[in-house]
Image: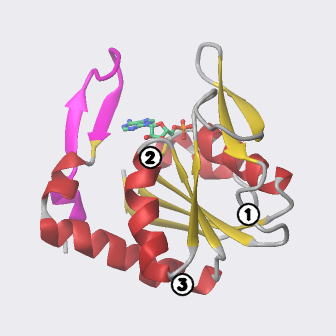
């Protein structure tokens, strides 16, 4: 199945010069939606995760059905101030300034294997910061899964040396 046919390119969003890869047509197509979750599940099965962590907010959309399908737990990584219990926090550089993300300290049983899911990897900063959060909980990053990789930005160079699954590359 040609998943790329269900990704819409929006120029100059959210700011001039950015070509936004919009996954909402994929979500709206029942065949493409089911196919993308099934393909993810097939490709990451060998990572043997105990949990999936989804990165706010499009990582939730793909991470949760994948956790359900694989029969593992799910935890959200969120923007600051959203999670109610004690959190670990990690900051990462943006083009201008920095961003912070948070994960509940007790999200996982220590020693677990955690698979990190997001819709897209660009510079890799968000996913690398999520890996730090997982390590702060005393767990191991079992791998990463992205629907889309923007290959030109070389984001995977920022990630720890674990397996990476991507469904589509640009
Ligand atoms: P990065 O930390 O640079 O790898 O950015 C990844 C995050 O930003 C992901 O959560 C994506 O959803 C979002 N993102 C970055 N660039 C794009 C893009 N061109 N199209 C859609 N989403 C993007």
The alpha-carbon separation of the residues under discs 3 and 2 comes to: 24 Å
Q: Which residue is mark 2?
A: 150
Q: Residue 165, percent across and down? A: 51, 68
Residue 151, above or below 52: above
Task: Looking at the image, tell me whether mark 3 or mark 2 is earlier in sequence order.
Answer: 3
Residue at 33% across / 21% down in the picture? 14
Asked if the residues shown at circle 3 and circle 2 are in contact, with their CB atoms under 8 angstroms apart, the answer is no
Q: Is mark 3 within 8 Å of ligand 1?
A: no
Residue at 14% across / 67% down in the picture? 30
Regarding residue 2, the answer to whether it shows in the image is no
SS for callout 1: loop
Q: Which residue is mark 3?
A: 45
Q: Residue 72, percent across and down? A: 56, 76
Q: Residue 34, percent across and down? A: 24, 73
Residue 96, above or below 6: above
The alpha-carbon separation of the residues under discs 1 and 2 comes to: 30 Å
Task: Looking at the image, tell me whether mark 1 or mark 2 is earlier in sequence order.
Answer: 1
User: Which corner quadrant of the image does residue 37 belong to?
Assistant: bottom left
Q: Is mark 2 within 8 Å of ligand 1?
A: yes
User: What label sits on residue 108 in the rendered view?
Assistant: 1
The alpha-carbon separation of the residues under discs 3 and 1 comes to: 19 Å
């Amino acid at each position: 199945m040609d998943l790329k046919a269900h990704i819409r390119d929006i120029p100059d969003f959210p700011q001039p010069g950015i070509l936004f890869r919009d996954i909402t047509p994929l979500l709206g197509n029942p065949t493409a939606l089911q196919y993308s979750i099934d393909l993810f599940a097939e490709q990451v099965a060998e990572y043997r995760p105990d949990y999936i962590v989804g990165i706010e907010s499009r990582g939730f959309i793909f991470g949760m059905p994948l956790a359900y399908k694989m029969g593992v737990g799910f935890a959200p990584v969120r923007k600051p101030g959203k999670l109610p219990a004690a959190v670990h926090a990690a900051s990462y550089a943006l083009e201008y300034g920095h961003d912070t993300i948070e994960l509940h300290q007790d999200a996982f049983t220590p020693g677990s294997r955690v698979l990190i899911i997001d819709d897209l990897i660009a510079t890799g900063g968000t996913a690398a910061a999520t890996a730090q959060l997982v390590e702060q909980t005393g767990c191991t990053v079992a791998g990463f899964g992205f629907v889309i990789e923007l290959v030109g930005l070389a984001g995977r160079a920022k990630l720890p040396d674990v397996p990476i699954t991507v469904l589509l590359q640009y």
